[in-house]
Amino acid sequence: MNSLRSLYILMLCLSLMFMGTGCWDQVELNRASLITGMALEPGQNMKYRVTFETVNALETDPNKGGKGGTPTALYTKEGNSIAEATSRLNESLERMPLLAHIRVIIIDEKLAREGINQFMDVLQRNRYVREDVLVLVAKGYPASDFLKTVYARGQYASYKIQTQVETYRQVFGGIPRSHLYDIAQALLTEGRVLMLGAITISGDVEKSESLDAIKTVYPAAVVRTAGAAVFRGDKLIGYLSNEQTRMVMLASDYVSNTLFSLPGPGGKPTSPGAIGVQFYHMHSHMHVSMDGDKPIFKLHVEGDGKITSIDRNIKLTKIQGFNTVEQLTSDYVNEKMQETFTYVQKEFGVDVFGFGEHYYRYHFRKYKPLAKEWNTLFSRADLDVKSDFTLRRPDLKTQKIEKEGIGP
Amino acid sequence: MNTDNLTTAGEELSSLEKVKQGLKDIFGQTTDLAVVSVHVGQYEGLLCYLTTMTSTDFITGKIVKELSLSEDKEQLSKEETFRELEDCHFSGLKHETLQNMEDSSNKMVLGYAAIFVDGLPLVLAVDVRSLSSRSVEEPTSQNVVRGPKEGFTESADTNMSLIRRRFNNVKLRFEKFELGYMTHTAVYIAYLDGEVEEHILEQVRERLNSAYIDSLFDSGRIEDLLHSKGKSMQLFPTICNSERPDAVCSYMINKRIAVIVDGSPFVLIVPSIFTDFFKSPEDEYQWFVIGSFARYLRYFAFILSLIVPGLYIAVTSYHQELIPSILLTSIAAQREGIPFPAGIEILLMEITFEILREAGTRMPRIVGQTISIVGALVLGEAAVQAGIVSNINVIVVSLTAISGFVAPIYTFGAKVRFFRFGMIILSSLIGLYGLVLGCCLLMVQLTRIESFGVPYLSLFSKWDKRRVT
């Protein structure tokens, strides 16, 4: 009897719980719309102009193929804050927006020059925006144009951009890590400034908005990576090219897989006799010391790799051949690294490499008085690069296929 | 009543006429009662038995022949003739000497033949029970690929012999009980003396003795009686069953008691714990790695069948951020245009599946083809094509359906299928929180129930002295 009564009470409580609060946050999937990309631009009437990319799920389904519509639809809203623009999205959209699946946030160049701190908070505060969402800077084109470039794989543009950036970083290393948490980390770190990935468009954006653009073999417009956007504090000050970005990332030990095209005897990459070497394990170590008021940076780069192409005949049957190529690689990397370093010193005068961060971590007491003027010190610092590359295999051929020649 | 019987004992057996009258009073007009006049030694006698409990061959070959042999002997007194019969002629058969009509009739119901001698107040009851029963066949619901193919039958005698021939051991004991005040069904417990714990044995005996039911046709009926009393309800089965003698014997080695019910091919195992329901005898007959893998697979399938539909509902209608984007767009594309919310959709298909399963079990064998065509094609394909349910829903329901049947003990799978509905409702109302809540409730239940004093999760939990009853 007693247990029966407690069972009744339990059931009463449960039914109260269900009837009182059940289903309150239910969002049925076919009454919701995924937001996959966001482009932030300065507004005309209000502070911001935000473009949202919403997915038309049926069109992205590879099995059903959809009805030939576009995989995404873009909605643009203006607001005095990003949150306002987001909540006004339903002025045009009929479904509940799901923010959790945002892939990329693209920041317009103009906004970036004004400073990104003003709107980063809403992205970091929101529980539905993931910490690993990509934040990229639109170079040379309005940010919303990037979401307008459809591509042939049928998925939405931001998915393409995200995968492209991640893959490019893994294969070549020519774009910095620019997730949402990297921004927070860079803004809070001493002795290293923020770098975000930059993307640009090659082709005609106007044509690319229609699906007809991908019915040709050569897409009308393609989103392309464009190296790194360099910030001073939270304001954009300039760009580095893909190759320069790679060197910077290599110095900070973020590149593990890349390919160098070593110039031939002419000294240019286009001159005949060039060699291609690919590295798949790369590491770099920094060392920072002060010589009076002039910092001395030492960088040691090492890597394991293989030879992918040789234009002139170097015999790889002997160890001598490998040594030659390794030496050539070392010289090339040292030179390029030095070039990039000087370029950054002259053009920007900010420490994108993270030498200051290294000094801060390993010699805190020495760094502390220099913290304020570190970027000035960086501009007149000396870099000493040493590299040590090991080529493990020549792939399938030990020798370039060539007639040996008969007779004298 | 008893005292009455004793005083009238001599009275009702005093003459053959009175015996006939007495039998008629007890058995009435039943046609299978055979009352045959015979000569017992030099005296008149009666041979009475129920034709439905024996065979003619047995009666003529064993009883009538012996009785006619006894005629040729020299003159003996009635008493001596009776002893002669008991000690020489029927010594090879199971027999008893009775002294009144009621005992004799009760014995006749069990398949004994009663031999009355004119004027002697003693009855010789000889076991002539010979019944046709199903021969030993392969088990139908608990199959193995490698291992003995014998399964229990409906005859308790056969079943006991199947166990005994696996245990050539003097310690094997059978004890008999009678349950059902209308049917007097024989129930046997089998155990290895010295191996089983005495207090568990005592509890089983006590519960079987105190059971008060009218009839008993299958061992499933006494599962409830054997459950621990005085505790709140038990959601999980605490009594395991098997129709494989090798499985039962392997349980008995592990200090368990087998309960055999006459008329049921399913032998009960007490006490049973959670892990027993995931064991198949085959696990021990093959390489241990494969056996263990299969066993872990069953645990995994159990968890799958419990939570997959609930998880699907919770994730697609409350926590879309938990799914990878590509998968979510794929699910969203399939859900596009489906009129029902995910919870209703899943419930719809789960109930459809339950109906299909029930129809598949109950229908006559001959129409079996029809069900599979209608079930698989019409319901599966057509429902998706018509846009009533989504593809992913069909995948989820089929995955859970298949996982639900992996448990080797059918009754366990049946209960899990039932809990699944609870999980579906909970998670469609309050999302992942409900699913976790449901799992917690089941866990609470799992940890608190016990089977004959043995904690249900014994193999996973630490031994607690205080719990020993």
Image (tube, coloured by chain):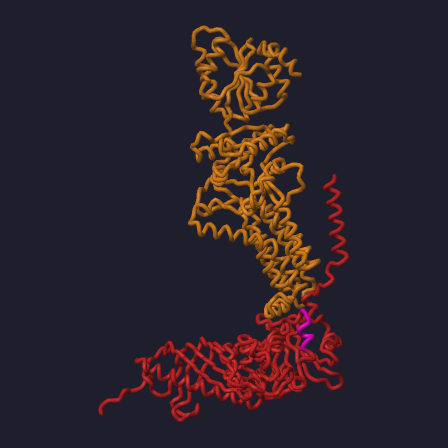
Chain colours: A red, B orange
Comparing A333 with B93, the one in front is A333
The residue shown at (63%, 21%) is B28
Give the answer, above or below, for where B47 lies relative to B155. Answer: above
Give the answer, above or below, for where B469 lies relative to B72. Answer: below
**In the current view of this chain or complex, which residue is farthest to the bottom?**
A266
Residue range (magenta): A120-127
The residue shown at (74%, 44%) is A6
> Which percent across, then down, holds residue A355?
53, 80
Do we see residue B344 in this rendering?
no
| Magenta span main SS | helix
Answer whether residue B76 is magenta in the image: no
Comparing A110 with A65, the one in front is A110
**In the current view of this chain or complex, which residue is farthest to the left?**
A407
> Which percent across, then down, holds residue B260?
54, 34
| Image quadrant assignment for residue B314 | bottom right
Do we see residue B327 in this rendering?
yes
Give the answer, above or below, for where B374 lies relative to B3. Answer: below
The residue shown at (61%, 33%) is B216
> Which percent across, then down, holds residue A152?
57, 79
Q: Is residue B469 left or right of residue A94?
A: left
Give the answer, above or below, for where A154 lies relative to A271. Answer: above
> Which percent across, then down, holds residue B415?
61, 47
Comparing A84 with A161, the one in front is A84
Comparing A204 with B158, the one in front is A204
Quadrant that contains the C terminus of chain A: bottom left
